[in-house]
Amino acid sequence: MKIRTQLLLANIASIGVIVIFLIFSYIEMVLPPAIFNLLVFITLIATVISILVHLYLTKPILKSIRDISAGAKKIREGDFNCRINGSNIIELNTMALNFNDMNEQLLKSFENLSKSEASRKQLVANISHDLRTPIASIKAFSEALEDGVVEDKETFHQYLRTLGLETQRLSDLIDELFQLSQLDADGITLVKQPYHIDQLILETLQNQLFQIEEKKLNIEVDLPEQLEPVSIAPSKMKQAVINLLENAIRYSPLNGTIKIIGKKDKYGFIKISMADEGQGIPEADMPYVFERLYRVEKSRNRETGGSGLGLAIAKSIIELHDGEIGVERNDKAGCTFWFTLKRNDH
């Protein structure tokens, strides 16, 4: 039964009680005929007015209910762009606002879900590609060695070296995927301790010395002498710095310069910047550089790019330390990656 019908029946029932009372009073001679006729007339007028008022008052209520019902139907059909108009009735207006807020949240959730699904598919496709390439190389070279088609000793050792490189490449990719899965795990806890970030950076530079010398890079380090310690998990943070440094080395030209600058601000944060002189990152790619397996170089050539996981791992580690990470384009060439950490004295 519709709400308007229910309200109308309730209204008629109350008037019916009055009519029954009047008839009973007339039969029992409680009321004189003249007064009875007057009361009947007044009751009829009141009935008409009551019905008109009922129709006037219930019209906006029913309209709002119909609008909400129609909106709910559209949402069920996948249309999240519908909006419910407000009402002069406070309660109905509040209901319409809440409905629209709920719809906006559903739309955002649906968009995020769609993006997540698209990212998942892209992630699977990229991982499949990155795994397939070294596996195909290992298969081809191992079959060639097994079939004995390589008779030259130098070529034989070259094939072995290639097998070793491809195996290491595959191992590195699997290790990075495992690191990322660990960082994504719910409830991960870091064992933090006060540590000087400048010391950690110098240790990282020492670890990457071979790659730096191989490209004949010039490293300029500008760190304040009295840089307060930060509360970090040293091994995790070192991995983040290594990933950022490897990225700078990879895209730096031969004989290029990498500048590492540390600053502290009055808000209790230390900012570390790492600038290179590479080709830089196109503006369109800037929002995506920290996404998993995203590469500015679209061919996914491992000679010109890494796995696409290093920056994503660095971002996860920095954020686990309640820090921020970002990238900016340099005026002349290259780009600057930076991250912030809170000083231990705050």
Image: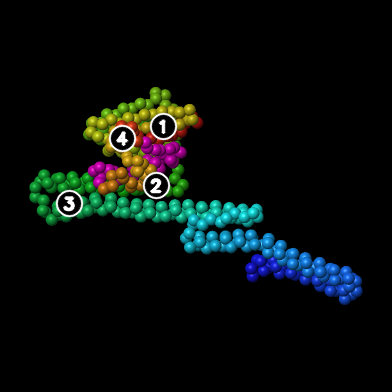
Q: Point out the frontmost of discs 3 and 4.
A: 4
Cα distance in 3D space between marks 1 and 2: 26 Å
Residue 102 position within the rendered picture, expressed as x and y whole percent measured from the top left: 54, 54
Q: Is residue 262 above or below residue 178?
A: above
Q: Earlier in the sequence, mark 1 or mark 4?
A: 1
Q: Point out the frontmost of discs 1 and 2.
A: 1
Q: Earlier in the sequence, mark 3 or mark 4?
A: 3
Identity of the amino acid at label 1? Lys
The residue pinned by badge 3 equals 141
Q: Is residue 53 magenta?
A: no
Q: Nearer the viewer, residue 223 or 110?
A: 110
- Residue 182's tag is 2
- Residue 271's tag is 1
- Crowding near the residue tagged with mark 3, few <14, some 14–19, many ≥20 C-alpha atoms within 10 Å: some
Residue 271 position within the rendered picture, expressed as x and y whole percent measured from the top left: 41, 32
- Residue 31's tag is none
Which residues make up the magenta segment?
301-328
Q: Nearer the viewer, residue 52 or 225?
A: 52
Identity of the amino acid at label 4? Gly
Q: Is residue 214 left or right of residue 2?
A: left
Q: Point out the frontmost of discs 1 and 4.
A: 4
Kindly identify the residue that appears in the image at 26 percent across and 53 percent down: 132
Residue 119 position within the rendered picture, expressed as x and y whole percent measured from the top left: 37, 52
Q: Earlier in the sequence, mark 1 or mark 2?
A: 2
Could one spot residue 79 in this view of the protein?
yes
- Crowding near the residue tagged with mark 1, few <14, some 14–19, many ≥20 C-alpha atoms within 10 Å: some
Q: Residue furthest bottom?
A: 27
The residue pinned by badge 4 equals 334
